[in-house]
């Protein structure tokens, strides 16, 4: 039977096993026992030796690397990280969990992107490990882990206050009776059995609660405890004179891993090529965006700037391929220090607001708060990393919605009929412009007559783009 600590490192069992490890002086030195566990795993498929974590620090980094690549890399292979599902790695995994949590707490703090990724990765790893177990072991492990976390027979919904306030679960995920959360099968049948006419109470329990809801609550509770642990480490670290250098080294190496998704993983799509984040190219903007940048001279200023321009410019700059990726991202995933937001994205949004008649912020300064909210940073006058997640980062509205809500902006050109969203237009036009660059370079090396013809073609293309 797999131990609870393999699923919940913060359990009593997990903490005791960490204390039993004794001195951790050799954290950065090769650990033959760890290497042996990994290389002997029959499911493990690692092509190169340098991909094998050889010590506690490398294992800690692999823990987070697994989640980041699984989330971002379409060519991700689970078999390269099979060792993370092997129960024999438990005692090493426990140390790596605490090392990673402490490094993030000391260096980055509880409101950081690093903290969020650590919490999410712990939840994802729990789910993956539970899926690898047979049904009987999984059920027993979930019940055992939940019994430690919920030490009372009757649980009021307010017991999950932290989970509800952090939106890790919703009330609609729970089955309630007079304010009590019902998780146990026998209690469900006792409370609801007589109310279920012409229905099998056992089947209804499996449908409404069963193992699925129990697993959800277990995972979300451990995620919340992980978040709380990082916060506690951060508070204690503020009183330290000098943090442990090993934790600082781990934090630096973690920063390198987090840079990879925006530089190494691309997503190919229709039309050809990879769509990467990069400086905004106005020549690739669709006609509706160009019109909005010039300023709204009639009604609809608020919607044009807040609901239309803000999502478009932020995604076009940071994540132009969001619809093909089909993943949930935050601004900080692409811009960890918000330098791009403050120096590139917001200035362009404010430029469009100033060009309105009258300028938007002169009579409605509160719209700056709404702009921050639409990028996911809550209803605050200043856009700060610590507030990220309070609201959703809105994706750009579709062409159909623009026609409905902002019809005066919709002036289609020859490329518009191929797409259904201005962001898709930006990706298509960017690709077309990239493909034309080598041709333009070749023409520049040709005869003077050809060069003059190229200039005329360029003027014609510009005219079409602005129509």
Image (tube, helix red, strand yellow):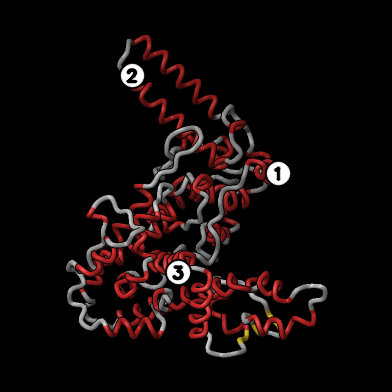
Q: Position of residue 124 (x, y in %)?
A: 46, 65
Can I make out residue 342 in this image?
no
Vertical arrangement, residue 209 with respect to residue 49, above or below: below
Residue at horizontal 37 percent and vertical 70 percent from the top: 87
**Residue 442 has which mark?**
2
> In the structure shown, which secondary structural element does the residue marked by tag 1 occupy?
helix
115 horizontally vs 248: left or right: right
What residue sits 67% from the left and 42% below the top? 400
Q: How far apart are marks 2 and 3 (CA)?
A: 55 Å
Q: Mark number for residue 404? A: 1
> Secondary structure under badge 2?
helix
Residue 117 coordinates in the image, percent (x, y): 41, 64
Q: Which of marks 3 and 1 is nearer the N terminus?
A: 3
First-in-chain label (1 vs 2)? 1
The image quarter in which residue 415 lies: top right
Residue 263 shows up from this direction: yes
Q: Which of the 4 image quarters holds residue 236?
A: bottom left
* Nearer to the camera, 425 or 370: 425
| Pointer 3 residue | 126
Q: Quadrant of the C terminus?
A: top right
Which label is found at residue 166? none
**Which mark is nearer the camera, 1 or 2?**
2
Q: At 31% across and 75% down in the image, what residue appears? A: 91
Q: Do the residues labelled 3 and 1 touch (CB within 8 Å)?
A: no
In this rendering, position of residue 116 left or right of residue 366: left
Image quarter hosting the N terminus: bottom left
344 relative position to 215: left or right = left
* Residue 129, placed above or below residue 323: below
For label 1, the crowd category at 10 Å Cα-Cα, with few meaning under 14, some 14 to 19 and many 20 or more, is: few
Asked whether 376 or 302 is in front, the reply is 376
Marks 3, 1: nearer the viewer: 3
């Amino acid at each position: 039977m797999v131990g609870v600590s393999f699923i919940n490192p913060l359990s009593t069992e997990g903490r005791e096993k960490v204390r039993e490890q004794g001195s951790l002086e050799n954290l950065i030195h090769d650990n033959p026992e760890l290497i042996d566990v990994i290389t002997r795993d029959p499911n493990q498929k690692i092509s190169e030796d340098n991909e094998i974590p050889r010590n506690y620090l490398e294992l800690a980094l692999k823990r987070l690397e697994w989640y980041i690549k699984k989330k971002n890399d379409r060519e991700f292979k689970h078999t390269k990280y099979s060792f993370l599902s092997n129960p024999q790695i438990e005692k090493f995994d426990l140390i790596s969990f605490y090392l990673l949590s402490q490094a993030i707490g000391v260096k980055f703090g509880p409101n950081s992107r690093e903290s969020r990724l650590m919490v999410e990765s712990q939840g994802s790893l729990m789910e993956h490990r539970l899926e690898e177990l047979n049904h009987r072991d999984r059920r027993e492990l979930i019940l055992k882990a939940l019994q430690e976390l919920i030490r009372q027979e009757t649980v009021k919904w307010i017991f999950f206050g932290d989970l509800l306030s952090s939106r890790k679960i919703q009330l609609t995920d729970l089955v309630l009776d007079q304010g009590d959360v019902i998780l146990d099968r026998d209690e469900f049948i006792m409370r609801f059995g007589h109310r279920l006419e012409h229905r099998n109470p056992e089947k209804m329990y499996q449908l409404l609660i069963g193992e699925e809801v129990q697993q959800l609550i277990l995972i979300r509770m451990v995620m919340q405890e992980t978040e709380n642990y990082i916060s506690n480490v951060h508070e204690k670290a503020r009183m330290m004179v000098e943090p442990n250098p090993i934790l600082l080294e781990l934090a630096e190496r973690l920063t390198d891993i987090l840079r990879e998704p925006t530089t190494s993983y691309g997503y190919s799509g229709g039309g050809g090529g990879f769509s990467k984040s990069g400086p905004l190219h106005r020549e690739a903007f669709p006609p509706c965006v160009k019109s909005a940048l010039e300023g709204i001279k009639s009604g609809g200023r608020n919607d044009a700037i807040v609901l239309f321009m803000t999502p478009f410019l932020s995604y076009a700059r940071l994540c132009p391929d969001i619809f093909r990726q089909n993943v949930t991202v935050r601004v900080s995933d692409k811009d960890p220090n918000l330098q791009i937001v403050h120096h590139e994205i917001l200035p362009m949004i404010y430029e469009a607001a100033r060009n309105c008649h009258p300028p938007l912020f002169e009579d409605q300064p509160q719209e700056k708060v709404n702009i921050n909210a639409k990028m996911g940073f809550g209803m605050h006058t200043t856009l700060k990393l610590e507030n990220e997640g309070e609201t959703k980062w809105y994706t750009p509205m579709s062409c159909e919605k623009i026609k409905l809500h902002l019809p005066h902006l919709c002036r289609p050109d020859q490329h518009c009929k191929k797409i259904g969203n201005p962001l898709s237009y930006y990706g298509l036009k960017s690709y077309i412009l990239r493909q034309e660059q080598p041709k333009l370079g070749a023409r520049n090396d040709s005869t003077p007559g050809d060069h003059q013809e190229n200039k005329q073609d360029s003027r014609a293309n510009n005219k079409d783009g602005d129509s």
